[in-house]
Amino acid sequence: MKLLDRYIIGKILSTFFFVMMILVAVIMVIDITEKVDKFNEHHLKFSVIFAYYMDFLPWISGLLTPIICFIAIVYVTSRLAAHTEIIAMLSSGMSFGRLLVPYFIASFIIATISFYFNGWLIPHSNRDRLAFEMQYFQNKFYFERRNVHMQTAPNVFLYIQNFNNQSNIGYQFSLERFSDNKLVEKLTSDNIQWDSVKNKWTIHYWKRKKVDDIFDLNSKGSLAESGLTKDTTLIITPKDFENDAHEYDGMTIPELSKQIEQLHFRGTTGVEAYETERHIRFAAPCTTFVLVFMGVIVSARKSRGGTGFQVALGFSLAFIFILFFTMTRTFAQTGSLSPLVAAWLPNTVFGVISLIMYKFVPR
């Protein structure tokens, strides 16, 4: 690695971490100001608040990494251009492609660290952060979905008409077992209640029927057994009826894959949000490379007005990218767009735009 490469890489990394420190500090101050009333309302100790922001810090840092990397690239490159350093490099015979090498090395360092943190370390701190926010900042959650259907095992399907997540009681419960697409056994109960001591469900006023044909279900001869109460173990727990908003933020990449597999097996809705998040975890490192490439192209030209225009243009492009990314993610989570397409479409579009802009960069 040449001295010039180390010089540019050092400039980029130092600027990146400095901008990260400044922006995160500003965001944390704003966040504390907005939440100070909640802290006082719940009489939270300083140690509790401090622990929360130690979990908040890595999350917001990971969220801002691609954009801060872009801003750092624009600032460093525009400063080099303003001091005619880029002109001197190109005049010495260095190609523009060779000039990009230290930029991509710096972006590789940032992307690798970001991928590891977002994929494995930050989710652990997010669990505590999300639990804290749900306890102190959000209103009490009431499970309002009705007619819940899910698959609990091969050819076994569960149904609950409605569930009270405050008392952990489900009403009009049934568990059906099929063989060769025919109903062979059905367990019904007026209600089921979670026993936190036994970690089991207690079913009340239950009936189990075994039938040879679905049309014999109501016949007296199909009644196998019944009772008042019975303890049973099911694949579901009260946790499945809790608020799962942004639950994927607290999952590592292997945990996301396992959760997606489980949701597909159960046939429940909302799997698109988890699939989108998993694809985004892998697309984020490429986002860094795309933004770095675009940042160099935007700011490599020397401007008589100084670096202000390049920085402003960089912020504008970053805003457009965020808006585009947010739109595609929203469409994917609602099922209107494939999660794979939603994660990679912004990179593809802005990558093509960068290649077009590359043709007009002064050599």
Image (tube, grey):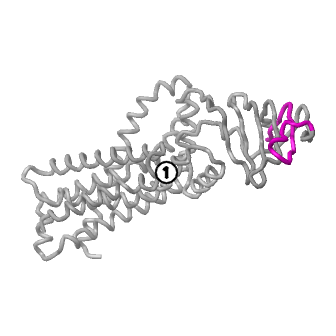
Residue 8 horizontal/vertical position (percent): 25, 65
Vertical placement of 162 versus 156: above or below? above
Helix, strand or loop under label 1? helix
Residue 269 within the segment the image draws in magenta: no
* Residue furthest to the left: 304
Count the labels in the image: 1
Vertical placement of 227 versus 344: above or below? above
Q: Which residues are magenta?
A: 199-220
Q: Residue at x 88, y 37 (%)?
A: 219
Query: Which image quadrant: the N terminus?
Result: bottom left
Q: Is residue 205 left or right of residue 107?
A: right
Residue 237 horizontal/vertical position (percent): 72, 41
Query: Is residue 315 in sight in this rendering?
Result: yes
Residue 205 within the segment the image draws in magenta: yes
Q: Residue at x 27, y 70 (%)?
A: 101
Residue 172 horizontal/vertical position (percent): 75, 31
Q: Nearer the viewer, residue 185 or 329?
A: 185
Query: Is residue 11 in sight in this rendering?
Result: no
Amino acid at circle 1: Glu
Query: Which image quadrant: the C terminus?
Result: bottom left
Q: Nearer the viewer, residue 299 or 154?
A: 154
Q: Is residue 81 left or right of residue 37?
A: left
Task: Classify mark 1: residues with Cα within 10 Å, few (<14), some (14-19) or many (20+).
Answer: many
Vertical placement of 176 versus 146: above or below? below
Which of the 4 quarters of the picture holds residue 145? top right
Q: Nearer the viewer, residue 64 or 175?
A: 175
Which of the 4 quarters of the picture holds residue 268? top right
Q: Residue under label 1, please give it.
A: 277
Q: Is residue 10 left or right of residue 362?
A: right
